[in-house]
């Protein structure tokens, strides 16, 4: 794993942008994308640039079950707002939260198999989840319906008018689906991610800490700020991004 430490999220946006730009220059055509607050500065840097994704395909990690793409809290809506409206791709896949679970999860996994992801960006849940793969999700899981944990519902409640409006289920790429990507970029900021970052990089590889599976992937870059990196003990592994 390559660990880059940035001074703030704006610098993280630049560092992440560089990873995207390099992948594109090297011929990448399929980009796995993520939602959450963490990737926003990367999407901002991309939309402000002249990078051209009009021949590329994007595949998002996950979507809330039961929300249509027109709902302001749906991940499709988020992606349109933060990236696709300003930087269109040839095709942008996000799971259809309104579709039947068995049909949609099978369809989505086929899309991933037909379009191998060159670069997958990931945020990190406070409990170490990636996509919506909560602790205990098997490492060989494919796209599936997820029951969100209370901690994830609580973390996402800030975006909804009422906690009861937060969806309880989602469709998510599985950990096995994510590991099919050729390259992975995981980004984490803030002290509330510090435990998960340390466990992901230095802890045992275990299904109790979904992100720890990344220790088994051959090409992972991690972007962190000082607060998220605070609990790492191998400090010499951390490369400052300037
Ligand atoms: C949600 C998303 C994850 C994301 C996580 C962290 O649960 N499904 O993909 O990584 O939140 O979000 P944030 O970046 O806002 O901290």
Image (spheres, helix red, strand yellow):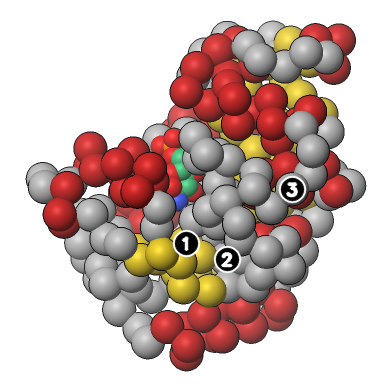
Give the distance between the C-alpha atoms of the residues marked 3 and 1, in whole angstroms.
Answer: 22 Å
For the residue pair 159 and 115, the one nearer the viewer reads as 159
Question: Can you give x and y, in whole percent of width and height, for residue 120 in the image?
Answer: 66, 51
Can the viewer see residue 14? no
Disc 3 vs disc 1: Cβ atoms closer than 8 Å? Answer: no
The local secondary structure at tag 2 comes to: loop
Give the distance between the C-alpha atoms of the residues marked 1 and 2, in whole angstroms.
Answer: 6 Å
Can the viewer see residue 221? yes
Q: Which mark is residue 206?
A: 3
Q: Is residue 68 left or right of residue 219?
A: left
The local secondary structure at tag 1 comes to: strand
Lower position in the chain sequence, tag 2 or tag 3: 2
Q: Is residue 1 left or right of residue 78?
A: right
Residue at left offset 80%, top offset 56%: 182
Image quadrant where one finds the C terminus = top right
Q: Which residue is mark 1?
A: 62
For the residue pair 180 and 164, the one nearer the viewer reads as 164
Residue at left offset 57%, top offset 51%: 135
Disc 1 vs disc 2: Cβ atoms closer than 8 Å? Answer: yes
Lower position in the chain sequence, tag 1 or tag 2: 1
Residue at left offset 40%, top offset 57%: 148
Question: Can you give x and y, in whole percent of width and height, for residue 13 in the image?
Answer: 54, 27
Image quadrant where one finds the N terminus = top right
Question: Can you give x and y, in whole percent of width and height, for residue 145 in the image?
Answer: 46, 73
Q: Is mark 3 within 8 Å of ligand 1?
A: no
Residue 3's place in the image compared with 220, above or below, is above
Q: Which residue is mark 2?
A: 173
The local secondary structure at tag 3 comes to: loop
Question: Can you give x and y, in whole percent of width and height, for residue 4 in the image?
Answer: 72, 21
């Amino acid at each position: 794993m390559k660990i880059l430490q940035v001074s703030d999220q704006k610098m993280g946006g630049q560092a992440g942008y560089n990873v995207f730009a390099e992948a594109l220059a090297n011929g990448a055509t399929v980009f796995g994308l993520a939602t959450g607050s963490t990737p926003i500065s990367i999407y901002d840097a991309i939309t402000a640039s002249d990078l051209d994704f009009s021949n590329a395909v994007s595949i998002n990690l996950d979507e809330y079950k039961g929300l249509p793409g027109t709902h302001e809290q749906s991940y499709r809506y988020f992606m349109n707002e933060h990236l696709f409206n300003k930087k269109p791709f040839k095709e942008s896949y996000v799971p259809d939260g309104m579709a039947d679970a068995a049909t949609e999860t099978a369809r989505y996994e086929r899309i991933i198999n037909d379009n191998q992801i060159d670069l997958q960006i990931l945020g990190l849940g406070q409990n170490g989840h990636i996509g919506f793969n909560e602790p205990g999700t098997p490492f060989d899981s494919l796209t599936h319906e997820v029951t969100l944990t209370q901690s994830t519902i609580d973390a996402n409640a800030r975006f909804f008018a009422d906690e009861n409006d937060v969806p309880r289920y989602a469709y998510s790429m599985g950990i096995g689906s994510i590991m099919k990507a050729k390259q992975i970029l995981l980004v984490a900021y803030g002290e509330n991610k510090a435990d998960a970052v340390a466990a992901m990089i230095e802890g045992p590889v275990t299904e109790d800490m979904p992100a720890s599976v990344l220790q088994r992937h051959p090409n992972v870059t991690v972007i962190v700020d000082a607060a998220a990196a605070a609990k790492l003990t191998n400090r010499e592994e951390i490369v400052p991004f300037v």
